[in-house]
Image (cartoon, rainbow, N blue to C red):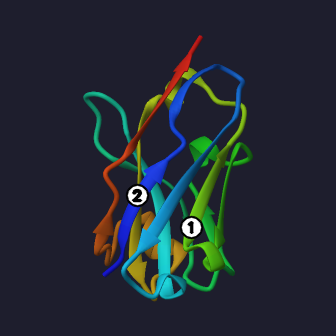
Amino acid sequence: QVQLVESGGGLVQAGASLRLSCAASGGAFSSYAVGWFRQAPGKEREFVVGISWTGGSTVSADSVKGRFTISRDNAKNTVYLQMNSLKVEDTAVYFCAAHRFGTAQTMAVMQGITSWGQGTWVTVSS
């Protein structure tokens, strides 16, 4: 199983952009679907965006469509989450997760996930 480490979180103003990174080690990263999830204080963890192990398909939650983009660089064992036009309601801890030979769709329903990162905080101020 891969180990995942997120980075890139921080405090930004509404309307700004951030790019989160999810770095993997310890496994054949190119064979893993990867998803980004978030959990705001007092709320359940929710799916944000996922990418298949082939990189050929992505799925996004309605709340972030048109603003967030996921991409992967298998040569660097890293998946990125580009977040644009951030809103106060995007404030949360962001986690990445992995599922070997998964799809973006299985990520969306948290199916088959075997690895989670420790999370990185994103705070958006008004």
Percent across and percent down for residue 51 are: 58, 71
Please give left or right for residue 116 compared with residue 102 in the image: left
**Depicted 108 relative to depicted 40: above or below:** below
Q: Mark 2 belongs to which amino acid?
A: Val
**Depicted 3 relative to depicted 15: above or below:** below
Circle 1 crowding by C-alpha within 10 Å: few under 14, some 14–19, many from 20: many
Q: Quadrant of residue 87?
A: top right
Q: Residue at 32% across / 73% down in the picture? A: 113
The residue wearing badge 2 is 5
Tell which of 34 and 64 is nearer to you: 34
Percent across and percent down for residue 21 are: 55, 54
Q: Quadrant of residue 25?
A: bottom left
Circle 2 crowding by C-alpha within 10 Å: few under 14, some 14–19, many from 20: some
Q: Residue at 49% across / 77% down in the picture? A: 33
The quadrant in which the C terminus is found is top right
Q: Mark 1 belongs to which amino acid?
A: Thr
Of the two numbered discs 2 and 1 on the same chain, state the one appearing first in sequence: 2
